Amino acid sequence: MIDSNAALRAWLLSDPAIVALVGGRVYWPTLPQDHLPERDGLAITVSTRGGRSDAEMPIINPSVQIETWAPAGEHVRAREVYRAIYDLLHGACGIDLGANGYVLSCLEEVQGQDSIDPETKWATVLSFYRLMMRAN
C-alpha cells in the first residue's frame, strides 16, 4: 500500500522552489518538538486526514492536510511557502514518485487559511488537497 504521507513529502522535496524555501524541513504528522522557526527556518507539515480506496481498482484517494510554518509575525513568508506548494500540486497529473507511487491527479480542496498557532504564536497557512494515486 502507498504511504500518502511519504509520497507527499518526497514530492514536495523534489521541487527546487520548495527546497529553496524550507530546505529538508518537511515533516509528518507534526513539527519535531524542538523545531523553532526563528532558529530553524520555515517548515511544512503534512498528514493524511482520510479519504477512500477504490473497491475495484488499486487506487487511493487520500485527503491531505498541509500546513506551513513561519516565525511569529511572518505571515508573508508562510504564505510564500503555501504558494510554492499550490504551484506544484494543484492540477498536477501523471507524477511518477518512484517507489512512493504515481499521482494520477491532485487538486486543492480548501485554499490556504492564514492563522496564528494558539500556543506558539507562529504564522501558519493551512490547506487541503485531494490526491488520486496508485502504486508504481
Image: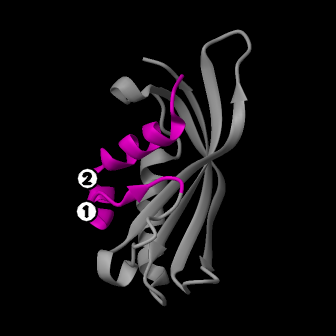
Q: Quadrant of residue 42?
A: bottom left
Is residue 19 in the magenta section?
A: yes
From the viewer's side, name the closer residue of 130 and 65: 65
Instruction: Tell me how far mark 2 sits from mark 1, CA to CA.
Output: 6 Å
Query: Under tag 1, what secondary structure?
Result: helix
Q: Is residue 104 above or below residue 122?
A: above
Image mark for residue 16: 2
Is residue 95 in view? no
Apparent side of residue 92 relative to residue 64 in the rendered image (left or right): left
Residue under pointer 1: 20
Residue 87 picture location, percent across and down: 44, 53
Cβ atoms at labels 2 and 1 below 8 Å apart: yes
Residue 74 picture location, percent across and down: 44, 85
Apparent side of residue 121 relative to residue 32 in the rendered image (left or right): right
Amino acid type at mark 2: Pro
Q: Which residues are magenta?
A: 1-29
Is residue 60 in view? yes
Q: Is residue 57 above or below residue 105?
A: above
Please report the residue visible at 30 percent of the width from the left and 44 percent of the height from the top: 14
Q: Residue furthest front?
A: 33
Please report the residue visible at 65 percent of the width from the left and 31 percent of the height from the top: 61
Tag 2: Cα neighbours inside 10 Å, few (<14), some, or many (≥20)?
few
Please report the residue visible at 37 percent of the width from the left and 41 percent of the height from the top: 10
Image mark for residue 116: none
Please report the residue visible at 60 percent of the width from the left and 65 percent of the height from the top: 126
Q: Quadrant of residue 58?
A: top right
